[in-house]
Amino acid sequence: MQKLVSIIVLNWNGQQFLEPCLKALQAQTYPNFEVVLVDNGSQDGSVDFVRQNFGKWERLKLIELSENSGFSGGNIEGLAHSNPEATYIATLNNDTEAEADWLVTLVERLEAKPNEEKWAAACGPMVFATDRQRVASAGIEIRQDGMALDRDVGRLIMAEQLEVEIFGPCAGAALYRREALNEVGFFDPAFFAYLEDADLAWRLRLAGWQTLYVSGAKVAHVYSGTGKQGSPFKNFQLGRNRVWIILKNMPTKLLLRYLPKILLYDLAACFYTLLFQRDIQPLRGRLVALSPKHLKRILGQRREIKKLCKVNINQINQWLVKPPSLWQNLKLRRTVDRLAQPHTEMAQP
């Protein structure tokens, strides 16, 4: 019998996305999975919509939370309600449509890996719902300036089949081995939303776990369908959580080596949003991250993560990509902003 997979789908006021997302999961060719749909205190009729349209689907578990606990907290709740016999845990955004062979492709490729190797996770390309020939995420890339971003974002999708090791998966459409999560933990609830998957990817990588990218496991994504690209809320979360990721996970020698690049990026990012968006939230997020209350917690987590570390500095450093110029960064951001514009086809209920 094929291994059981628990797919966690988190929803917050996303009724307009639920039908295409859940219908795509009903069409999956993998025979042994459950869907744990966690509603994060929605006020838009999402729960009633699911009950009316998918209430008879025997694979679906609907978990209702009374308030919004964020992407991290909602997925943690989903994990708690997943079948304990599930070998794999998949996380999937509600604003996605997974191709029918998405799940079977990821499971089969991980199962094909030798038992002596530690493969923690797998993911395929997430493509923009507005342009399904362009990549929204091909996993997570970590740069020397501490930036965690979607790998290959904005690039044309490759026609050939590709299977390669990457730093970590994007949790918008990822498959995790439960054994690995049991070792390093799941998402950090303090992150609330954004970059929690990069934090988890760091912990897995430091503990010696590997992640596989499989180009054949495709998912269409309404980019920032819930959090909204460029919103003050998202800018605050990204600014705060970026600092936490670096302080929690980056080894001391690498942190000192790349500190000038880290500071240069932060100064440029804050200046850009202040000047062009009149938004102080990226700066505010960074200041909140460095407050004494949070620093004490983060440094305590750093000590615990260090105890799990099974790789050396050189093994981590080889994954840190040289950052592009500030101009190239700006060009990439504008490309993503354009591709993230609302997509009417998937935005209809």
Image (spheres, helix red, strand yellow):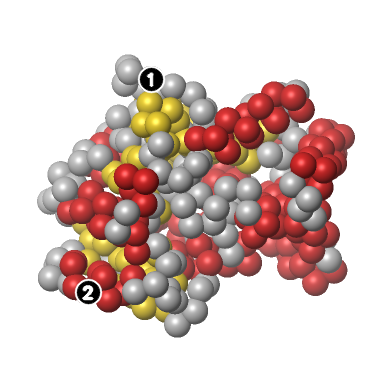
Residue 135, above or below 185 = above
Residue 349, above or below 84 = above
Q: Residues within 10 Å of mark 1 (few under 14, many from 20)?
A: few
- The answer to whether residue 176 of the structure is visible from this angle is no
Residue at image point 57% right, 60% down:
193
Looking at this view, is 90 or 208 the one in front? 90
Quadrant of the rendered image containing residue 218: top left
Q: Tell me how far mark 2 sits from mark 1, CA to CA.
A: 39 Å
Q: Residue 12: x and y, percent?
A: 44, 67
- The answer to whether residue 161 of the structure is visible from this angle is yes
* Residue 207 in the figure: left or right of residue 253: left
Residue at image point 30% right, 30% down:
216
Q: Residues within 10 Å of mark 2 (few under 14, many from 20)?
A: few
Compare marks 2 and 1 and give the one earlier in the sequence: 2
Query: Mark 2: which secondary structure?
Result: helix
Q: From the viewer's perspective, is the residue at label 2 or at label 1 nearer?
A: 2
* Residue 311 in the figure: left or right of residue 92: right
Q: Residue 152: x and y, percent?
A: 52, 28
Q: Residue 349: x and y, percent?
A: 30, 59
Query: Mark 1: which secondary structure?
Result: loop
Which residue, as the protein is rendered here, is positioned at the far top? 160
Q: Which mark is residue 89?
A: none
The residue that label 2 is drawn on is 51
Q: Residue 251: x and y, percent?
A: 74, 43
* Residue 323 in the figure: left or right of residue 12: right
Residue 18, above or below 249 = below
- Tally the numbered discs: 2
Q: Which mark is residue 158?
A: 1
Residue at image point 54% right, 35% down:
338
Question: Type of residue at label 1?
Answer: Met
Quadrant of the rendered image containing residue 52: bottom left
Question: Type of residue at label 2?
Answer: Arg
